[in-house]
Amino acid sequence: MRTTQFSEQQLPRIAKLLGFDKEPKWLTIRFAIFISLSVDEKIDTSDKIDFSDGKTYSLDVITGKGKVDLQGEQADYTDLIALMIANNEKSKVNTQRGLELKLEQHCERGFSILASSFNENSDVFEWIKQEFL
């Protein structure tokens, strides 16, 4: 899964506002993806996303593909996240590359939403309450 330069620039700022600044990047990336999935509006797939100055993350980092936690319990959320995307878009996610493409689109939209919604003094939890409750 690839990110854009914009997402990578927003990542530390959003992570700090969420209190995730000492946590792994995947936590903030997943948050952005889930924010995008919470929007009841289709992603415009005609918009071309420029990944040239972003980064590439493997699915084991973003979704936990093939992972188990320290207690030996399943920590692979790939199927769950694919189902969430399929449910949101009312279409199947049939391939790993198809999943990666959807994750890229939702990551970009999620960071766009978060970047436009927050400033350095924002109360993230108040925003979540207003937007989603």
Image (cartoon, rainbow, N blue to C red):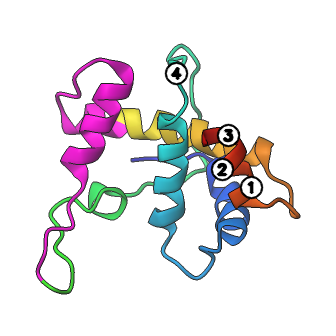
Which residue corresponds to mark 3?
Answer: 131
Membership of 83 in magenta stretch: yes
Which residue corresponds to mark 4?
Answer: 43
Which residue corresponds to mark 2?
Answer: 128
Does 32 appear above or below 124? above
How much space separates mark 4 and mark 3, taking CA atoms?
Answer: 19 Å
Residue range in magenta is 72-100
Q: Residue at x 24, y 55 (%)?
A: 77
Q: Secondary structure at mark 1?
A: helix
Q: State the residue lying farthest toward the bottom.
A: 70
Q: Which amino acid, mark 1?
A: Glu
Does 23 appear above or below 126? below
How much space separates mark 4 and mark 1, taking CA atoms?
Answer: 26 Å
Q: Please tell me whether mark 4 or mark 2 is closer to you in this view.
A: 2
Asked whether the beta carbons under mark 2 and mark 3 sit within 8 Å of each other, the answer is yes
Membership of 118 in magenta stretch: no
Does 54 appear above or below 28? above
